[in-house]
Amino acid sequence: MRMTKARALPLLLISVLALSACSADGQDGPTPSASPSASAPSTSPEPSESPETEDAKPFGIQGDGAEITADGTARLAAAKESFESAAGFTLQGSAESSGGALSWEMTASGDGSDWTGTVYLPQQELRVRHTEATTWVSASEEYWTLFGLPEELAKRAGEPDQFVVFPRDVPVATVSFVDVSTLVQAIKMLDPATASHTHDAADGTVVFTVEAADQTTWLQTSANPTPRLEGLASRAAGSLNAVVITYLDSAPTIELPSSDRVIIAPKP
Amino acid sequence: MNETHGGRARTGLGAIALALTLGFTLAGCTQATTTAKPSPSASASASPSSSASTEAEPDATADPESTATAEPGEVKQNTDKLVDPSKAADVCGVFGALSDLNAQIAALSPESAQTRFGDLLRLTGATFARLAEVDDVTELRAGWQKVGESATKAGDSFTVFGGEAMNATTLEALGQLSIDYEEVVGPQLENVQKRCGVDVGSLTPVEKE
């Protein structure tokens, strides 16, 4: 099955986030600093400027911020721990690159194994459900045609409330365009010690910066006494991706499609 | 599922539902080289009622293409039609067709059997639903219906998960089917033998401790 633009876009979203989160290993540890940070208040993950502008930063922050302190590292570690122990999340994401833009919203279990939600592409919406290593996607005939399904199958797949199922034995690369599991795991793999700078926002949130050779990741922690990871953004290869995290008291219940509304995705 | 697959000898229990569910499922799930091996007695169990079912519904076949709603659209496989016991006119016709279907399954390659597992589950569901309709022993109808619904549920789950049984939802449904089958069909083996001359128990491989 050929890789098409329709699939490449969301794939980029997740892969960039995952790569960014996982590749911070080589960073130096925390560097104590007493210098005040310069930041702008913002709770939005949306990039304030075009992602093509390399200096543009998410969460409304500006400048390089302050070097991280031991307290900062502890705060980030606590926020990460909060993320790791959560029962569930709502994740609101956006991605911009020279190839286009998209946004998405998923409700996911805390371990990232189950999720359901929608990916918003230009003039397209993908409804996605995932549980037990199986993914169901509902989209238009146009999308499935671009995706590479044979014409007749794309037509059937594009019918209202029809889902294409990607069984567990379908290679991960085929369904990674909605791979919230990878995103959640990538966040959990983040090493707080790799953060180098912080920005104290006026609203009390703190944004941490993790810089790697070819990408930068920002993590926004809450103003609560018990820090929570509330946002994540990453810039790499000319794209800027961001996610807002809202915590839930329980994992979502994934409603399975009806058996007569399911088409098996052909194996690549 | 372990409750019904392992454990004590099970010479008296069995038939299509178990052959379809446990045998094929476990073979498919474990990637074992020995897929469902319906007992030799399956093909030899063509009792008089088997021909009775043929007479009742000589063309009682199911087109898997029409029922396999989740098959990959562009891939047409296994166009051979399976016997559909649910098309039989009466109880003995249904059980006779079950015997024929079992023989048909025995002749399938492991790959074909696995590919058509969803169809087989749906056939099982329809078969027991049919029993619930036509059995003149009305007190048995609820049991047949229960097994039919369990089989249909398992088949639906198998389909929804893309023809995969290795997930908790489908495995649970298959386990429930096995339990319901044993509970409902097990006590009726002698009765079916008397009524229809079909040894339902012989349709299933013998399992020993």
Image (cartoon, coloured by chain):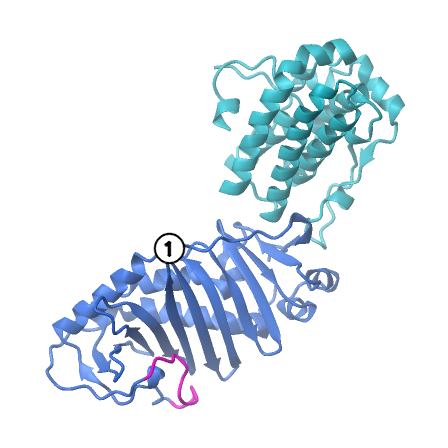
Chain colours: A blue, B cyan
Task: Identify which residue, A96 or A40, lies in the foreground.
Answer: A40
Question: In the image, what residue occupies the spot 25% across and 66% down?
Answer: A79
Vertical position of residue A177 compared to residue A101: above or below: above
Q: What residue appears at the point 74 percent right and 24 percent down from the top-left corner?
A: B98
Q: Which residue is mark 1?
A: A111
Q: Quadrant of the C terminus of chain A?
A: bottom right
Q: Which residues are magenta?
A: A42-53
Please rate how many residues cluster around mark 1, counting C-alpha atoms within 10 Å: few if below 14, some from 14 to 19, many from 20.
many
Residue sitting at x 36%, y 60%: A185
B171 horizontally vs A44: left or right: right
Question: Dividing the picture into quarters, in which one does residue B204 lie?
Answer: top right
Please state the chain letter of the residue tagged with numbered disc 1 in the rendered image. Answer: A
Residue A246 appears in which quarter of the rendering? bottom left
> If the image is split into quadrants, where does the N terminus of chain A sit?
bottom right
Q: Is residue A263 left or right of residue A79?
A: right
**Is residue B33 in view from this perspective?**
no
Relative to residue B195, is residue B149 depicted above or below?
Answer: below
State whether residue A263 is above or below residue B172. below
- Secondary structure that dominates the magenta span: loop
Q: Position of residue B24 (x, y in %)?
A: 60, 32
What x and y, as percent, mark residue A163? 63, 58
Mark 1: secondary structure: loop
* Residue B63 visible from this viewpoint: yes
Whether A67 is drawn above or below B43: the answer is below
Q: Is residue A62 magenta?
A: no
Residue B56, image x and y in percent?
88, 23
In this picture, residue B90 sits left or right of residue B113: right
* Residue A51 located within the stretch drawn in magenta: yes
Residue type, numbered disc 1: Asp
